[in-house]
Amino acid sequence: MLLLLCVFVKEGQTVVVPFIFSILLSILLLPVTNFFEHKINLPKSLSTFISVILALAIIGGLIYFFSQQISSFLEDIPTLKKNLQTHYETIQKWIQKRFGISSREQTEMINNATADVQDSGSVISKTVFTITNTLFYIILVAIYSFLILYYRHMIKRFIFAIFVKAKEPEINEVLLESKGIVQNYMLGLVIEMGIVAAANSLVLLLIGVKYPIFLGVFSAILNIIPYVGILSGIIFTVLVTLTTSKDISDIIWIIISFEIIHFIDSNFLMPRIVGSKVRVNALITFLGVVIGGTLIGLPGIFLALPVIAILKIIFDRIEDLKPWGMIMGDDTERGEIYRRIEKINLIRRKKSLPPIPVPPLGESPGTIIAADTPGADNEK
């Protein structure tokens, strides 16, 4: 099944990728649609249309911002090439002095290594093709999102109808938890990304780097990618700074500042803003990012974590799939649960109260504690 699913995603990515994005966007826009529909009493079709248009306006604003920044960046390419040539010659002299490899030999090595690089015409055509694909995806996502939001009640009835009546509470729980996780995760991610982008841009402004806002926002977007995003952001910012500045201290300050921001983000911002609902261990997260990137490229990297989190919710609710949910979960979380229960049981033994049973996998101990004795709330 896993193999067939990977083949389906790989071969049908033109359909699968925009559809998955539209599902996530629809869940994120659901509160907005409900607000227009129930609070302002607009028709369902108009409420859905306004929500999708607002989302498109925000996406269009981001695209416009990046296009302006990239346009300004491209205008300075002659200066960038000149500075890059200076750094290149400095590195060549250091290699010749250190390893005894002449400049001519270094040039031959580089030429041999880049012999298979595409010519400029193919690169331009590929870029145009990528832009066309992106616009096509945006249009598809907008249409899919509108239709999913418009027919959301029918889709929900369909999901309930394909399972037996006895499974309705479990299905409803999965749907509610999935909706909550996606909304909290996506909204929290946007807030966290905005804070990191502001911090990055401020640091780059203080250092005096060129294109501070563009580099700060771009690094914040890359930071969404688990584990490898921060490294990619630092490398890209350092490479651009090398072409615009000849002071090596700027590079050192960029690396130190970005690492400090990443430390604060990982240990304080991410747990509190994005929330602790997405509890997937580091191994599965990294594996999911690699598999997603291998199958469908950059979209797979961004989709990996929310998709894995939703799968874990489903696995935890199905008896035969609970081992899969267990391997995807965070063992440190379960260890903390056990430590808290042992501590509470010790207090209860001193008071001659019956011990609290260990919760089964995937079940919160709060329910067991709250339902046990009248004094359980205080002990919790």
Image (tube, grey):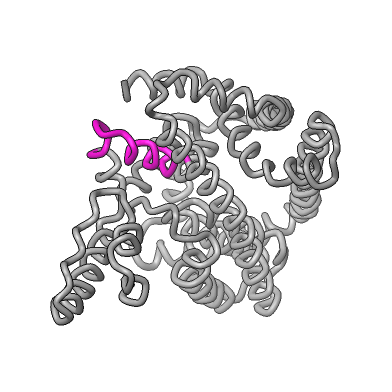
Seen in the picture, residue 19 relative to 8 is either above or below; the reply is below
Overall secondary structure of the magenta stretch? helix
Seen in the picture, residue 345 relative to 151 is either above or below; the reply is below
Quadrant where the image shows the C terminus: bottom left
Magenta residues (range): 307-323
Front-lying residue, 157 or 204: 157
Seen in the picture, residue 327 relative to 294 is either above or below; the reply is below
Look at 38% across and 36% down and name the residue there: 314
Front-lying residue, 230 or 325: 325
Look at 40% across and 19% down and name the residue there: 7
Quarter occupied by residue 339 = bottom left
Front-lying residue, 234 or 46: 46
Q: Whole-percent x and y of residue 268?
A: 48, 72
Q: Whole-percent x and y of residue 371?
A: 32, 60
Quarter occupied by residue 253 = bottom right
Q: Whole-percent x and y of residue 84?
A: 61, 59
Look at 16% across and 68% down and name the residue there: 354
Q: Whole-percent x and y of residue 101?
A: 37, 56
